[in-house]
Amino acid sequence: MTTKSALRELCPYVCLAALGLGFSVSLAFAAERFGAAMPQVAKGGDALSVAFGDAKTTISLAMVHKADSYFHGGIDMDCDDAHGHGHERGQESEDEHGHVHEHEDEGAQSAGGGSDPWRWINSHIRAPEIHRHLDGAEAVELMPWFWAAVKADPHNADAWTTAMYVAERMLKDRNLARRIADEAGAKNPDSMEIAIATAQFEYDRGHGDVLLAEALFERVRSIGKAKCGGRLAELDPHDAEDFCRALDYLSKIMADRGDKAGVRQLLEEVRSTGLQTPVLKSIAERL
Amino acid sequence: MKTFLRQIGALVRLSFVELWRRNDVFGLLVLALALMAPLSMASPFGASGASRYLDEAALLLIWAFSLFIALGTGSRLFPPEFESRTVYPLLSKPISRGRVLFGKYLGAVSASWSALAFFYALYFGSSLLRGGSASAEFFQAVALHFAFVALAVSVALLGSLLVTPSANLTLSAIALTGMFFFGRRLPEYAETLSAPLAWLTRLVYAVGPHAEFFDMRQRLVHGWGAVDAGVFAVVLAYAAAYSCVCLALAAAALKRRRL
């Protein structure tokens, strides 16, 4: 092969590489210049996020779904939020029951197969005889999927908070939970969901972490106020709920300290959100 | 009978040598190592002890590679022979077209099985190193995977006699991977479609190659235990019956082909 023909063969690849490079540079420029105008794709701010922003979010959600399937011993539960693990509100027992109940229904539906022989085969090959949940040290099997989820989309608050929950409550590894919380906070400084989950962990531990928890709840409070420019009635319902929850915890801490004026101020702020929430009653009772 | 076995043996040997001479398997092995090595070294959030994701990734790769090899060998059995006209000296021998087809099929299946056995041996070795052990479901999973490979080769072989090689590879890959991932959900999906599409989806569900029957990865990874022997036998019978139908159709297509 002569040099000329070798170069001719290489030509398309060189052109392709140049095109790719040009594309990447344009994306990087777009991320830098128009990042604020494309919040749906330019989450990470880099070229990859611009190109694959939505895909990365979808992959991240799929990874969380996979972790959920691992929690149920490999069964694809198609869980929705209503059947979530409820770690944020400490409702494990109810939700555990919810899961078992749902699975039993699914098993009863699929095991029969009726007149469909293919379904009969599938139900026997692809469904376990007993429904088991990962528990204790076994829950470490969930971590790679949460890790992959947050690698794909570092703004997936659900993945971060569930990973924290698994580390703290299931693995009983506080250092791991703290590391996850720190990383989550560093990558999502404006996320109320992550801030409140971190604060709750610190508060629930008690034993001297209340001061840190208070600072974190105050952070949620200031993020909430910053999001709506101080007009709390304009907070979106999800954020308003998180905001009120943070104030509920803060009111407990202040009431324990005997700071009635502070609690009154918190009650006013909850009222300003316009949200009809049980938090109103619980804060009022602390006055 | 002796002649039959000698003829079949020669054809099997030919397919076998062809696969291993092409070095596809070693290429795939290097790819597998390149993918698995970083995964095995990962320590998510600094937590150690998770291994199921490794098993799952390894098994997925084995499935992908086995499909690649099965479709490759199955679809390459006849088209190159037609193109290079080597089929003429082959058929000029005292051997029927049906016997050539069957011999080539057996060769492709045994060659693909040998590659699959090689991959499973590596998987089993790595599993033993991580403290795993041989279980009934492992052997069932391997057996069902072998049955799937036989089915996939027959599908590719049938396609190779009906459409062009590239169309065959594409259609076979779409049919098998589509059924592998979505096959069991087709009836629910059909419910959401309009009448003609729903009817088409149900037809695909009824006659398509149900690759998902052979997938015991979740059982292996999560330790669900072995499948009931009756169900296991039914799935093997399904693979045998489906392969036989594909081979019969392929034999008819070859017989009608003008050479």
Image: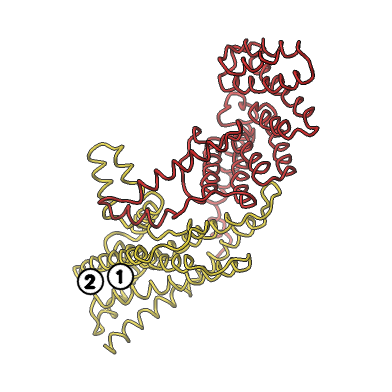
Which amino acid type is shown beneath numbered disc 2?
Answer: Leu
- Residue A6 drawn above or below residue A166: below
Q: Give the quarter of the figure containing the C terminus of chain A.
A: top right
Does B58 sit above or below residue B89? Answer: above
Rendered location of residue A91, percent (x, y): 57, 34
Q: Which residue carries the number 1 mark?
A: B82
Of residue B253 and residue A201, the one placed in the foreground of this image is: A201
**Do the CB atoms of the residues marked 1 and 2 lie less than 8 Å apart?**
yes
Q: A132 or B240, which lies in front?
A: A132
Helix, strand or loop at mark 2: loop
In the visual, does B72 lie left or right of B221?
A: left
Q: Which amino acid does label 1 sit on?
A: Phe
Q: Residue placed at 50% from the left, 36% from the top?
A: A83
Marks 1 and 2 sit apart, C-alpha to C-alpha, by: 8 Å
Q: What element carries label 1?
A: helix
What colour denotes chain A? red
Q: Residues within 10 Å of mark 2 (few under 14, many from 20)?
A: few
Q: Residue at x 29, y 80 (%)?
A: B90
Marker disc for residue B259: 2
A139 in relation to B28, above or below? above
**Rendered-image quadrant of the N terminus of chain A:** bottom right
